Image: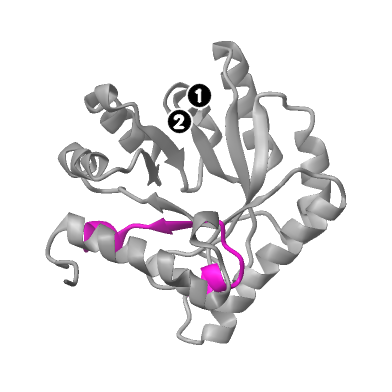
Amino acid sequence: MSADPSTLAGRLAAVRARIAACREAGRDPAEVTLLPVSKTFGADVVREAVLLGERRFGENKVQEIQAKATELKAEAIDWVVIGHLQTNKAKAVATYAAEVQSLDRLDLAVALDKALQAQGRGIDVLVQLKTSTEDTKSGLAPSSLPGFLHELKAFSSLRVRGLMTLAEASDDEAVVRRCFADLRHWRDRARDEGHDVQRLSMGMSGDFALAIAEGSTEVRIGNAIFGARN
């Protein structure tokens, strides 16, 4: 029986099934983590997803995390920042977030480390690289990654676990796959240089099958799970 696409449970089951089907690309489904992206959806929707087995949720805006974390405190959710982050949000991130996937510059690392040290906490972070040509996309220039990873060693509260990217918004699969292949290349190069960066957060609702084929270890899925946003 096929999953009912009109329900959150049905859409989530369909996404999980598509991830499981990555065996066709020569990947072990156990190597690919799902990160539901709940931005713009309310606490009730997130609570429903929790009942369906999800415990980590991606959000673009720190103020959304703050509001939902307060309302859903009893659910013990891990909130993941995936959107462009301003340094003045560092204190709120240190309070509410379990992970940041959009670390892309040194001043942000300084602000996050200071806020986290004040709270005696440490969090996982991914470095966001810009692999597309679009001006609207954020991220560190890939050629700056080796030096940036070296600088991040000074911040004990930031546990660098891998890399993240947003692929080009293109109908050309070759263009999209190039973005993902580039991220994998820079991750592999960083590992060869001795950095413990294993994770590749890449792939969203429209392109996650291509991302998995190119080595993604985590896909960030919003619309395909929660439906169209307002």
Q: Secondary structure at mark 1?
A: helix
x%, y% of residue 199?
Answer: 62, 51
Colour scheme in use: one colour
Disc number placed over residue 97 in the picture, else none: 2
Q: Position of residue 64 (x, y in %)?
A: 31, 37
Q: Which residues are magenta?
A: 210-230
Can you see residue 197? yes
Q: Which quadrant is home to the N terminus?
A: bottom left
Instruction: Give coordinates of residue 40: x percent, y percent.
Output: 26, 48
Left or right placement of residue 197 versus residue 14 in this view: right
Q: Residue at x 33, y 29 (%)?
A: 66
The vertical placement of 68 against 133, above or below, is above
Q: Quadrant of the C terminus?
A: bottom left
- Disc 1/disc 2 C-alpha distance (Å): 6 Å
Report whether residue 230 is seen. Answer: no
Query: In the rendered image, which quarter is residue 140 located in?
Result: bottom right
Place of residue 215 in the rendered image (x, y in percent of width and height, measured from the top left): 61, 66
